[in-house]
Amino acid sequence: MADAAYWIEHHRAALERESGLIVDRERWTRGFSSALYDVLINRLGMYAVVHRVRRQSFLPRVVRTWRHLYQQFPLDGVA
């Protein structure tokens, strides 16, 4: 998971370079944190419903990864 910060910054810098626009680092990271919530609400919830009927072997691993990312990139002001 230590690589997550590297890849988030890598993609921000690539977008900045290719678009020729300045992409604020703090706003980019906050957007990533917001996207984590979106994944939780719109994807993982649905997978959990399906998991109740038919085991999704990947789901525990995905949830574990989500938790680790959330611990590194919590969305400030939301609890």
Image (cartoon, grey):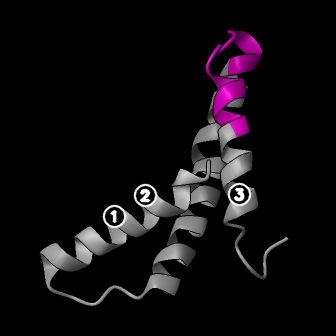
Is 53 in front, or is 64? Answer: 64
Q: Are marks 1 and 3 in contact (CB under 8 Å)?
A: no
User: Gap in Å between the C-alphas at discs 1 and 2?
Assistant: 6 Å
Does label 3 or label 2 sit earlier along the sequence? 2
Mark 2: give few (<14), some (14-19) or many (20+) Cα within 10 Å: few
Query: Which stretch appears magenta?
Result: 51-64
Q: Is residue 4 above or below residue 33?
A: above
User: Gap in Å between the C-alphas at discs 1 and 3?
Assistant: 18 Å
Q: Quadrant of residue 74?
A: bottom right
- Residue 46 visible: yes
Q: Amino acid at mark 3?
A: Tyr
Instruction: Name the residue beneath numbered marker 3.
Output: 70
- What residue appears at the point 52 percent right and 66 percent down from the top-left corner? 32
User: In the picture provided, is 12 more to the left or to the right than 69?
Assistant: left
- What residue appears at the point 24 percent right and 79 percent down from the top-left corner? 16
Q: Amino acid at mark 2?
A: Trp
Under circle 3, the secondary element is helix
Q: Is residue 59 above or below residue 31?
A: above
Decide whether residue 38 is among the magenta residues: no
Q: Are marks 3 and 2 in contact (CB under 8 Å)?
A: no
User: Gap in Å between the C-alphas at discs 3 and 2?
Assistant: 15 Å
Residue that extends furthest to the top in the rendered view of this protein: 54
Residue 7 badge: 2
Q: Is residue 70 above or below residue 29?
A: above
Q: Is residue 64 above or below residue 60?
A: below
Q: Are marks 1 and 2 in contact (CB under 8 Å)?
A: yes
Mark 3: give few (<14), some (14-19) or many (20+) Cα within 10 Å: some
Residue 11 badge: 1
